[in-house]
Image (tube, grey):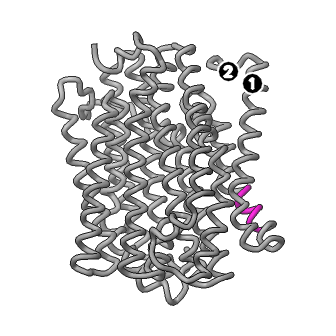
Amino acid sequence: MNKLDAMKDKNPLLVFAKYAIPSMFGMMLMAINVVMDGVFVGHALGATALAAVNIVIPVYSFYVAMSLWIGVGATTRYSQAMGEGDRKKAQTIFTQAVFLIVSISIIVSSTLGLLGDNLLSWLGANAEITPMASEYLHIFLLFGFVLTLENMLSLFVRNDGSPMLAMIALIVTAVVNIGLNYYFLIVLKWGIMSAALGLIISAAVGILVLLTHFVHKSNNLKFNFKFKGNWYLKSFFYIGFPSFLAEMGISVFTIAYNIAIVSAAGTMGAAAFSIVNYTHSIALLLFLGLSSATQPLISYYQGAKMYKEQKAIVKYGITSSVIIGLVIIVIGQVFTTQIISLFGSFTPELIALGTESIRIFFFAYLFMGTNFVLITFMQTSGHVNFAIFITAIREFVLVIIFLLVLTPLLGTVGVWLAVPIAEFIICILLSVYFIVIKRKDKLTAL
């Protein structure tokens, strides 16, 4: 019996814990990794460099979005195939997904590279920020495929019954990146380009760790090129599209906030937003880790027609997300000054902006995790269309509307309120949807 089939005989709570704990722990380390990037850049190179990295974050988010688009779609089909007992089909899905993500990553990097500094201007960079942002972006585009491949392999390894190895790979990636950032920026005193180089090298090391899965006896991940015209690419894009939209929403969020803050407060405003954005990454990756942990379980139980167990996984995910959200809110209210000081010694103006942003923005986390879990459930259990709709509204409509409406009325307070209000409304919409569907008896799992 392989690791996936063993899930049929286990308590759903134990299975949830087995997947959620390592996934969230690994994502927590990745979040610390992201924050440490900001800490080293801020202390070694100053506020302008911090703003420059934040300008490039939407490009990073786009690469993550691509890997999730294909990866979540492919791993959902993979787990469903394994739940059905069709191992050859699962291996074909794995083969096609790896080929697709590497090819698309190279094409995207080449295209974005042709845009040059125009791309940075569109992302909200001003003349002071552009030179540093350009250095960082150059390295990132050259080796972006390394990041997408690592994300893809991590998803497949987790879906193939090895969440601990996926977590270990994340740990190694985070530790290597932190070490390289310290060595490059603090010891050698290199420029901002070295921060991007550290990110790429650490991702490559993470891939090497993930490749050890292929030598295990329990490994089901093998390349199968004999698929006789059976291509599953359409289903990859369809199922994974909500995940792509969710991650792209991070890009839209970052670009919109950068443009608003830079126009209102210049480079200092961009630096203030970079602080809240770095701290935001911790909560975001925690919730992503939680929803990623539920995805293979929901998919497997769907394929095995074990709907009671599937229902339990969703409930465990929602409960966990609410608890995590409350803890983060308390931390944001109590330790605001300490959080800001992590990134360097700043002017009173910057500290005031950072304090205001954290104390308001963090209320979004009361609803955000629940929204992630429910959207993951929908896209992996046959409700993809609504998942796409709700994700599009969440990421591309509500936040922009509230920024446009609240900023003129409330100034920077309105900027920070946009996301919490948007998350609250999405939570209401999701709740209404599930109540209606449950009454119609169309949602088997709930």
Q: Position of residue 127 (x, y in %)?
A: 52, 89
Q: Is 177 left or right of 385, judged from the image as shown?
A: left
Check the picture and name the quadrant holding the C terminus: top right
* Residue under label 2: 443
Q: CA distance from mark 2 to mark 1?
A: 6 Å
Q: Is 443 left or right of 180, judged from the image as shown?
A: right
Q: Position of residue 399 (x, y in %)?
A: 70, 59
Q: Is 146 left or right of 280, judged from the image as shown?
A: left
Q: Position of residue 169 (x, y in %)?
A: 28, 45
Q: What is the residue that sits farthest to the left in this orientation?
A: 215
Disc 2: CA contacts within 10 A as few (<14), some (14-19) or many (>=20): some
421 or 36, which is in the foreground?
36
Region in magenta:
398-404
Disc 1: CA contacts within 10 A as few (<14), some (14-19) or many (>=20): few
Tag shown at residue 437: 1
Residue 90: quadrant of the picture: top left
Name the element at disc 2: loop
Residue drawn where x is 16% and y is 32% of the image: 215
- Residue 329 included in the magenta stretch of the image: no
338 or 51, which is in the foreground?
338
